[in-house]
Amino acid sequence: MQLNYRYVVLVLWLLSFSSWAEGDFAAQLKEAGIAEEKVKLLLDQDITDCEVVNELENSDLKDIGLSLGLVIKVKKLCTLPQRKPGQVFQDQLKNGGLGPKMVVIPKGSFKMGSDEGSDDEKPMHTVTIGYEYAMSQYEITFDDYDRFCEATGRAKPGDQGWGRGQRPVITVSWEEMKVYTQWLTEQTGNPYRLPTEAEWEYAARAGTTTSYSFGDDVNQLGNYAWYDGNSGNQTHPVGEKRANGFGLYDMHGNVWEWVEDIWYTNYEGAPTDGSAWLTGGDGSYRLLRGGSWSRDPTNCRSAGRYGDTPGVRYNDLGGRIVLGVLWTP
């Protein structure tokens, strides 16, 4: 590939300004799981810094031997590190307006599952999220989803007469949430997707090891969640309760949230790197997390989980999205 002169000048300027740029960039790529030979392809073309990557077109990166998936991964890797954990941002949509508010989640390790819960939550196991990613600060709302429906000509889901606006969207299937994330990707140029189950629980726990993100006292649940004890048998606008330690709202209750993974009856052999579990198990069922307005406190625990068919729509099913490292089947 012949790089444009302005790219070469930019590279030389960056290297003169920071002699450690190449080593730091290579380490960052390898940490994100990009194979060493692909890292070498970039460095051999004097692509040694995220600022250079962001100046290049996708076609330029594909020309040196990167697949489209790797191009997207490298591009996103060079977007998220410029934002710090806890930072809230919104991506611009091509057709006007802004996407959902996103919060950058720090990398780290946590204990997933519960040895005191139901069998499907066992065994508790350590998962290491070795990358930063961003998660929607709130459950996807009717405002968010209706914008997608209007842009694509899809029928809008019903609201049970409870209202739309900032209430979480309901009666949406796993399949429909996937299409929504694909639309966001097309609108923003960034790889939006459903969270993996591990990413969801890591974000829900927000550094805690207790039943809920605020501790074990179920009497405090009403400060953080809409559940069967306080919901009045309906959803409520997002963000009315307290946030967890990562700045995320309604991780307990309000609506169940679809995640990428298929259903497993326990965690024997589960991935430990934050990736989605997509082989084996029951592929006819997808997972939901977080509990809902219609469920009891047990279902709303950080470890609580539930599976259903990917095409089903109920009035307590909704979703949340992420942006970051790609996990694909």
Image (cartoon, rainbow, N blue to C red):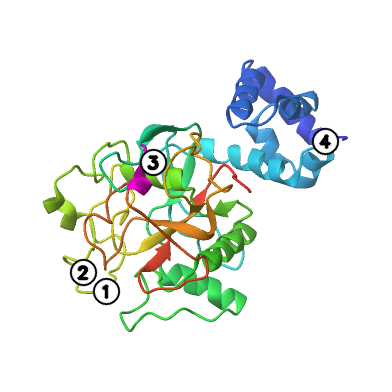
How far across and down, in percent of the image, does residue 273 sit? Answer: 51, 34
Q: Main secondary structure of the magenta part?
A: helix
Q: Residues within 10 Å of mark 1 (few under 14, many from 20)?
A: many
The mark nearer the N terminus, 3 or 4, is 4
Residue type of the residue flagged with mark 3: Tyr
> Tag 4's secondary structure?
loop
Q: Which mark is nearer the camera, 4 or 1?
A: 1
Q: Which residue is mark 1?
A: 234
Residue 3: quarter of image: top right
Residue density around tag 2, few if under 14, some if 14–19, many if 20 or more, within 10 Å: some
- The label shown at residue 64 is 4
How far apart marks 4 and 1 lie (CA) works out to 53 Å
Q: Determine whether the residue tagged by mark 3 lies in a helix, strand or loop.
A: helix
| Apparent side of residue 279 relative to residue 308 in the rendered image (left or right) | right
Span of residues in magenta:
119-123
Where is the N terminus found, in terms of image quarters? top right
The residue most toward the top is: 19
Disc 2, disc 1: CB below 8 Å? yes
* Label 4 CA crowd tier, 10 Å (few <14, some 14–19, many 20+): some
- Disc 3 versus disc 2: distance between alpha carbons? 25 Å
Question: Residue 231, labelled with which disc?
Answer: 2
Residue 157, given in percent of the width and then of the height, sits at 46, 78
| Tag 3 near tag 2, CB within 8 Å | no
